[in-house]
């Protein structure tokens, strides 16, 4: 498993910008890769040490995230609120719906900027299922994600040498290997869950007695 994780990590690293694009699509759609793009943007920017390269990495990560959200939007916008009910636990569904119905724009901004464990994809799913305008949603997510990755990249340029030394530390190497393993397992669980929930009708909520 360790060797598989190393291969996956090196794979995205060697791809450079396209690797960030691909990982962004996977992370923002139906797979599970928390902080993957953040770590790659930081380490790649620290190694490149140029503003142009940093902005390129931030843009590619942002573009991947937007494309991943578009995939989610296509599926959930068609499924509507009934489809959303199949994909989210009831408590999370109520929380996300409340935030999106109250102020979808700010909910999407916060979801795009804040790191895990703050949820991201559930807000995208809710906005799509509740028919929030598609291109407005994608524009908000794109702007917020670009701000997030640019800030991380700028910090990487500022503290580049320290970051590279930190990345080479054995403890972090094991952490990254563990993160890739968690992402791989989480992605399998996520995809299986999507398929099972899509096929299984959700039982209606009980009607309270009068």
Image (cartoon, rainbow, N blue to C red):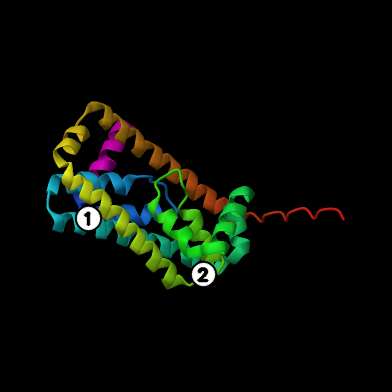
Residue 200 seen in the figure: yes
Residue 191 or residue 25, whichever sits in front: 25
Q: Quadrant of the rendered structure where residue 21 is?
A: bottom left
Residue 29 seen in the figure: no
First of labels 2, 1 by sequence position: 1
Most prominent secondary structure in the magenta stretch? helix
Q: Position of residue 192 (x, y in %)?
A: 51, 48
Q: Which residue is mark 1?
A: 57
**Mark 2: secondary structure:** loop
Residue 25 or residue 45, whichever sits in front: 45
Which disc is residue 13 wearing? none
Q: Position of residue 85 (x, y in %)?
A: 62, 57
133 shown above or below 165? below
For image coordinates 39% across by 62% down, the residue present is 141
**Mark 1: secondary structure:** helix
Alpha carbons under labels 2 and 1: distance apart: 29 Å
2 and 1 marks in contact (CB < 8 Å) = no
In-image side of 129 versus 170 (left or right): right
Q: Which residues are magenta?
A: 1-11
For image coordinates 20% across by 58% down, the residue present is 55
Q: Position of residue 79 (x, y in %)?
A: 57, 66
In-image side of 118 versus 4 (left or right): right
Which disc is residue 132 wearing? 2
For image coordinates 39% across by 65% down, the residue present is 140
For image coordinates 29% across by 29% down, the residue present is 174
Magenta span contains residue 8 = yes
């Amino acid at each position: 498993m360790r060797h598989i994780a190393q291969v996956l990590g090196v794979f995205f690293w060697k791809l450079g910008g396209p690797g960030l694009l691909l990982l962004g699509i996977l992370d923002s759609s139906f797979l599970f890769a928390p902080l993957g793009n953040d770590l790659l943007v930081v380490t790649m920017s620290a190694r490149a040490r140029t503003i142009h390269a940093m902005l390129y990495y931030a843009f590619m990560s942002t573009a991947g995230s937007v494309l991943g959200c578009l995939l989610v939007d296509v599926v959930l916008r068609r499924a509507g609120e009934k489809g959303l009910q199949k994909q989210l636990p009831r408590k999370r569904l109520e929380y996300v719906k409340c935030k999106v119905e109250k102020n979808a724009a700010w909910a999407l901004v916060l979801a795009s900027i804040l790191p895990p464990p703050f949820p991201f994809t559930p807000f995208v799913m809710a906005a799509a299922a509740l028919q929030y305008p598609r291109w407005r949603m994608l524009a908000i997510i794109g702007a917020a994600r670009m701000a997030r990755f640019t800030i991380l990249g700028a910090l990487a340029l500022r503290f580049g040498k320290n970051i590279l030394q930190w990345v080479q530390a054995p403890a972090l190497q094991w952490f990254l290997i563990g993160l890739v393993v968690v992402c791989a397992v989480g992605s399998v669980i996520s995809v299986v869950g999507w398929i099972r929930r899509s096929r299984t009708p959700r039982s209606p909520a009980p009607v309270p007695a009068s």
